[in-house]
Image (cartoon, rainbow, N blue to C red):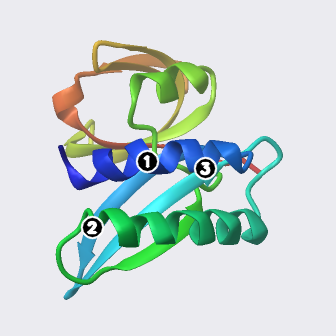
């Protein structure tokens, strides 16, 4: 089991008991440092007190279960307004929302396409960009994130 899956398995019930949703778990290396991040969501938005409460509740469990060999920094954050969509449920939840699709290789000269999410099925992403409907295969897409319009 991957570190992120293991941490998610014991962190999710704690996060939910504190009135939040566990949006994502990330374990990444940045420079010479490793970071374990929990991203939270909540109706009405996540604030600093939510992050503090989750951090205080999960930190002792991390010490007890010790899922990561070596040292790392533990952070609890809001998923943010321009969060990354990863799981099929994320795409279903935000159908009709403005998104940005980042591609591995440019399509029609663009590597980043502002558009609206219209469909998601078996990794295939359907969007509306201007008057065009475009479908991307999973292998073309590097990242999909919500886009806030002002």
Say above or below: 150 vs 88: below
Image quarter (top left, top right, bottom left or bottom right) of the N terminus? top left
Q: Mark 2: give few (<14), some (14-19) or many (20+) Cα within 10 Å.
A: few
Say above or below: 16 vs 55: above
Nearest the eye: 54 or 97? 54
SS for callout 1: helix
SS for callout 3: helix
Where residue 99 sits in the image (x, y, percent)? 53, 38
Which residue is label 1 attached to? Answer: 10
Compared across the picture, whether 129 is left or right of 34 comes to right
Residues under labels 1 and 2: Cα distance? 19 Å
Counting every numbered tag in the picture gives 3
- Quarter of image, res 87: top left
Residue at x-position 36% and y-position 53%: 7
Which residue is label 2 attached to? Answer: 28
Residue at x-position 26% and y-position 62%: 67
Which residue is label 3 attached to? Answer: 15
Residues under labels 2 and 3: Cα distance? 21 Å
Residue at x-position 53% and y-position 49%: 83
Give the mark, 1 or 3, whose residue is nearer the N terminus. Answer: 1
Where residue 5 sits in the image (x, y, percent)? 30, 44
Where residue 114 sits in the image (x, y, percent)? 50, 41
Q: Is residue 14 visible?
A: yes
Q: Mark 3: give few (<14), some (14-19) or many (20+) Cα within 10 Å.
A: many
Give the mark, 1 or 2, whose residue is nearer the N terminus. Answer: 1
């Amino acid at each position: 089991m991957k570190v992120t899956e293991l941490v998610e398995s014991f962190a999710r019930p704690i996060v939910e008991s504190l009135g939040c949703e566990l949006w994502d778990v990330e374990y990444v290396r940045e420079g010479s440092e490793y970071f374990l991040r929990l991203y939270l969501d909540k109706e009405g938005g996540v604030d600093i007190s939510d992050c503090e409460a989750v951090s205080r509740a999960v930190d002792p469990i991390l010490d007890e279960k010790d899922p990561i060999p070596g040292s790392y920094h533990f952070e609890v954050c809001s998923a943010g307004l321009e969060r990354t969509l990863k799981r099929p449920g994320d795409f279903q939840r935000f159908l009709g929302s403005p998104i940005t699709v980042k591609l591995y290789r440019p399509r029609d000269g663009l590597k980043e396409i502002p558009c609206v999410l219209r469909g998601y099925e078996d990794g295939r992403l359907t969007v509306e960009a201007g008057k065009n409907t475009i479908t991307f295969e999973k292998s073309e897409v590097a990242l999909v994130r919500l886009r806030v319009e002002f």
